[in-house]
Image: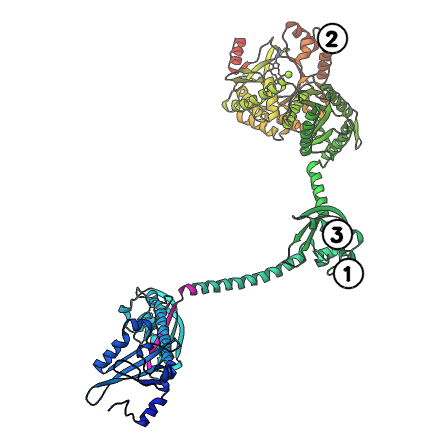
Amino acid sequence: MSLVASPDAMYRLLIQSVVDYAIYLLTPDGIVANWNAGAQRAKGYSAEEVVGRHYSLFYTQAERLAGCPDLNLAQARQTGRFKEQGWRLRKDGTVFRAHVVIDAVYDDDRQLVGFAKITRDCTEQYRAHMAQREQERNFRLLVQGVSDYAIYLLDTRGHVASWNAGAERTKGYRAEEIVGQHFSVFYTEQDRLGGLPQAGLDTALRLGRFQAEGLRQRKDGSHFWTSVVIEAIHDEDSGELLGFSKVTRDMTEQRGYEQALLRAKEAAEQHSQEMAGLSQFLDSVIANIPASVIVQDASSRQILLANQQAERLFGGQAASMIGQLPEQCLPEVTASYLAQQLQRGALNDRPFADESRVETALGMRTLRSRVLRCERSEGQADYMLFVAEDATEQLAAHAQIHYMAHHDALTGLPNRTLFSERLKQALARGEEQGKLVAALCLDLDNFKNINDSLGHAFGDKLLRALGKRLRGELREHDTLARLGGDEFAVVLTRLDNREAAYQTARRLIAASGPVFRIEGHQLSIGVSIGIAVSPDDHTQAEQLLRYADMALYEAKRNGRNRFESFHVELDVAARQRRLVETDLRTALHLGQLQLHYQPVIDHRHDRVSGYEALLRWQHPVRGMIMPMDFIPIAEETGLIHDIGIRALNLACQEAASWPGEQTVAVNLSPVQFRDVNLPNVVALALADSGLAAARLELEITESVLLGNSEENLQTLRALKALGVSISLDDFGTGYSSLGYLRSFPFDRIKIDKSFVHDMCESREAMSIIRAITELSNSLRIKTTAEGVESTEQMRRLKAEGCSHLQGYLYGRPVPASERLMRLQRSQE
Ligand code: C2E
Ligand code: MG
Ligand code: MG
């Protein structure tokens, strides 16, 4: 039966009406035999247009060229069916995805009658399918490629089912190592013991999702901080549990950041607390600092802050300054001062500092102020900060301290400090002007005695009175200073020559001459002056002063109440003195000091009544040095105390060894009288040596009595009380006054050798000798004439009634050993 020839009506109707499937028949050689509605719908051709045409027109050109239509029919012919999905052409040239089935149709005789072809347009499904495939592929690629996250699946019991690159990277296992293992290997032992892995799965099961952070373990045993999400996966249709997805992220770094952030936050919080505390502290500091603080808005000029001090200093009134303009709340002068300061501050980049005398509510004050501009955040006007310190008292105190530091409290004259400053200034200026500058050192003669006898208060008055007189002799630009004690000094500036300095010195000496009347006493005083001139002598202040001092020393040596100018020899002499001083100390220790003895003759009994002990210095280099060349230096340096004790002890010891009752006379320096212990020293020397006190004579000079010093007289009396004799040496020189003889009961007077030397030529010398001997005889005091060199002198002195004689005529001073030899000879 031919299908075409005898189609069942119903069946054909059905086929014809099917619209979703193109159903049509092909002849054995591929010609379209019939056409249904579905075919028309799918391919766009009507039955008339397509029936009778070869079905290859539905194929794309590429497939046609490849012979696909025939090949497909051939397959259907051979196998009974050809089935494929492929692209087919519509009438309008567009393509659609077609699901094609070609069935070979045979008649009852197994003869091929044609092909039944069923084509379904499945473009939509195909596209959807393809899209899904693409999506799945992408997703897989994505999951596997993700390296930041460990993404893997677990089966229902928690065994690892899949493994991505991120997992490998995070945990260190490769897929083949880990798949199949239980995921608890990622947990720390502690967590495992705590049942944490299962608890996670349970939660995911219960809630669908488990999320946590925690410490996990890598393959190598190291730990990392991680964020974990476990989700349960169920079959959509049956709801059956398929397993779990697990996404883990290594949070080590993030956790580091977080913790750092946390720490920073804590620090910031603490800092802000501190800041709050600090700001509170600053508030109270501002309120309480002893400075006035005002803050002004730079543009509105409104006062934003004024502390108590500021209100007290400027405001004065009860009303607060805050919120006002300076001119609204302050007196005019104060407001304009403040305005001026703030304006200057505004013009300056740096803080503006100032010191001014200002009329304030507290009176005229010196304010030391600083103004500075403080920048505020953008858009806000700047602050002007004004801080002022009331420096009035401080400056006054400074001025006072400065004055005190530079002036002598007693006389109000400049002191040593100011003197040095003035001298330095004068020297610098003198150099510029080509003028001379002189430094004068002044010293009162015997001021110590005045102080000692009339008291310090009296001495102070004298110094003040003298200061006034001296100042009166100087020009405005000269400086008179008191350096201490009775030492004064002068700077003379703008001198044309040295003579000008000498003239001033003469005037100063003359001015101090007239008697001073103080507290009912009348007394006159001498002044010695040393002068050094710059630039001739020296240009440095210190050295110039030292030179003036040397000149002063010279003036005193040369007889006091005079001036002396520096010359180089003085410096040489001063050096020499210093050398002697050091040498002398050694001499004392090494026993280079010896005593020579000169006989004293009692001519009435024609015998040696005793010996005078005279010091000699046996210098290893310079040979024998005479007392005049070292005693003054010993006196200046105080060494005379030790030397005196040495001489005393030595003389007593040697005299104690002499046979007979001869006396020994020891010279005492006036300086030794400053030691109140002197009587003890003498008593000890006697005790140590065993010498009878009556055999010791102590020789003193008039200067010991000068100024009628009560202390010295007491010492003398104490000495005499020991049983020793006291002689007045060198009588007739210096201040010679017969009055001294009445002040103390001397045992002996020694007439100075200068009178003996002159007696034969000078009537004056002769008459002095006569006066002394007469007075002495009447007072029953022994007299010794010193320096008797000739028989003529001896004869006359005897005639004048001198009891004792001493001089080269009878014998020169000789060492103790020689003295003994001569003694023995004279006794022979
Ligand atoms: P002085 O106490 O007046 O001693 C007498 C001085 O005259 C001695 O000088 C003596 O050598 C010297 N002289 C004695 N006879 C003659 C003479 O005929 N012609 C001349 N031209 N001179 C004669 P010297 O030893 O140089 O002593 C000088 C002064 O040194 C002493 O004068 C005395 O003031 C002092 N002096 C000596 N020894 C000491 C001492 O141990 N202690 C103290 N403090 N002063 C002493
Ligand atoms: Mg003497
Ligand atoms: Mg003498």
CA gap, disc 2 and disc 1: 99 Å
Q: Is residue 579 visible?
A: yes
Q: Of discs 3 and 2, which sits in the foreground?
A: 3
> Along the line of sight, which residue is nearer the eye, 417 or 108?
108
> Along the line of sight, which residue is nearer the eye, 203 or 656?
203
| Residue type at numbered disc 2 | Arg
Counting residues from the N terminus, which is met first, the one under dot 2 or under dot 1? 1
- Dot 2 corresponds to which residue? 763
Magenta residue span: 241-254
Q: Of discs 3 and 1, which sits in the foreground?
A: 3
Main secondary structure found in the magenta portion: strand
716 lies above or below 607? below
**Callout 1 environment at 10 Å: few (<14), some (14 to 19), or many (20+)?**
few
Q: Is residue 246 visible?
A: no
Residue appearing at x 75%, y 54% in the figure: 314
CA gap, disc 3 and disc 1: 21 Å
Q: Is residue 440 magenta?
A: no
Q: Can you tell which quarter of the image residue 2 is in?
A: bottom left
- Dot 3 corresponds to which residue? 339
Residue 294: percent from the left, percent from the top? 70, 55
Residue 567: percent from the left, percent from the top? 65, 18
Mark 2 within 8 Å of ligand 1, using the beta carbon:
no
Counting residues from the N terminus, which is met first, the one under dot 3 or under dot 2? 3
